[in-house]
Amino acid sequence: MSETATSPTARRAGSGANPRIAVAGFQHETNCFTPIPATLADFVREDGWPGLTESDSLIRTFSGTNIPIGGFIDAMLDRAELVPVLWASAEPSNLVERDAFEVISAKILDGIAEAMPLDGIYLDLHGAMVCEDFEDGEGELLARVRNFTGQDVPIAASLDLHANVTDEMVSLADIITVFRTYPHLDMAQTGARAGDLLLEIIHRGRKPHMAFRKLPFLIPLQAQGTDTEPAQSLYGCLPAPGSLGTVAAEIALGFPPADIRMCGPAIITASYSREIAEHAADMTQERLLWSESQFPTGMDPPETAVRRALTAGRAGRPAILADVQDNSGAGATSDTTALLAELVRAGARNTALAALCDPEIVAAAHRAGTGREIRAVLGGKTGGSENPGFEGRFRVSALSDGKFDYRGSMMNGVRANLGPTAALQVVDSAADVQVVATSERTQCLDRAVFSHLGIEPADMTILALKSTVHFRADFAPLASAIIPVEAPGYNPCRLRSIPYRRLRRGVRLM
Ligand SMILES: [Zn+2]
């Protein structure tokens, strides 16, 4: 958090006029309450996000995408000599296994060692990674990088809006930027902003003062959307991205299903003036404290939610039921079926649900073929007796290899690879409900999750989406109503019901 000069020798590493910057990314959002671990294979494999990517293919894979490292690369290509090292992410899940953290960290360290001498380092991190051995995965990675480079090489990191920022992250990095939107429409911009500030530090040869504030309460994920208040105004009041000669300010709203000491919202500001940075942090903290009681935490139980959807939805203007607690994008299993069961029980028609992860039933559907019927238990493969699955007959209405391009504003241009997928029509005399079943867990944040199987979401009367907030980017324009549902899932959104053991004393829950 100190303001120091960099060594003049560190500013002459680039072979030409442009500074030489190593670029790497290691992303995980850890949910300490889900039964799914984060293995090395999960980081290597492609899923709803690209798989582990190394060296020059980083530029090809991420340039033009709304992913932080892509935004950094696009903004810096003509202004820096980039040395691409590695990028890896896994779908949110429980603790990152030791092997995964050690192998990927070592590859990043090796890549940086090979790239030396460097003028700067950029890391595309999440900020909510918890490992088997460390509560603060990003802090540990930054410590290892800093230990290798010493103080001379400036390090910039971009973080997710859901980062659980720690003192270590702030003291080990020289500048940190954080997404300002949820749904995350500005991931690439946040990477680019980190690039601008890193270049400023390199060119001035001087590190800014960073101020850090940690807030004494947690905010449920479904209440953090920046299209709704109070988050919209909180981010709207941040100073526009600018120079460290004035001030840079960031807010992270935190990732509550992380049972760690430093769980929760935080504010980071940076300036060449210590006084200005500290003052901006105080002002932003005051606004966030004042907003505590205004976060919208409401959810309806499935029966009430479906009744409301039956009234509000019509073909071409669907009611959206957000299955906020079974969102794999927050670490849930995406295979609970209480909302599906209620839709069928209530006789919902012209209704589609996505995405339910069940590789077994997808394989059975592919063996049976399009137009055939199968009898099976759909979902409920994880979580024991509390998640029994939905037993019934299903007609296979469409099949796919699960490879398609996202087209919504959040993930536009990114290629999804969900493994084989199937559209399954529940065979029922009254209800007309289709389910998109996948082999990989994936958050339903893009209409293509339906349309790649021939289901047009805009034509439906009711859509049930396993997503907390991200779905709003692509689906809200279609919706006659958006109804958050409190159905079972491993992304607990009623924070007072979570059996935390490791939070800081006195942290308030909603
Ligand atoms: Zn996020």
Image (cartoon, helix red, strand yellow):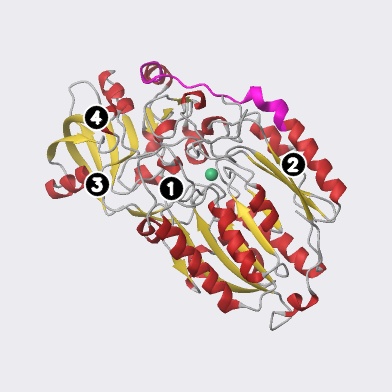
Mark 4 → mark 1, Cα distance in angstroms: 25 Å
Check residue 359 in the rendering and tell me which mark sits there, or answer none: 3
Q: Which residue is mark 4?
A: 388
Q: Name which residue lies at 54% across and 24% down.
A: 297
Badge 3, how many Cα within 10 Å: few under 14, some, many 20+?
many
At label 2, the amino acid type is Leu
Upstream in the sequence, badge 4 or badge 3?
3
Q: Which residue is mark 2?
A: 238
Mark 2 → mark 1, Cα distance in angstroms: 33 Å
Q: Which residue is mark 1?
A: 95
Query: Where does the image place residue 348, in percent across and percent down from the top left?
Result: 30, 22
Badge 1, how many Cα within 10 Å: few under 14, some, many 20+?
many
State the SS at label 4: loop
Badge 2, how many Cα within 10 Å: few under 14, some, many 20+?
some
Q: Name which residue lies at 48% across and 56% down.
A: 413
At label 3, the amino acid type is Pro
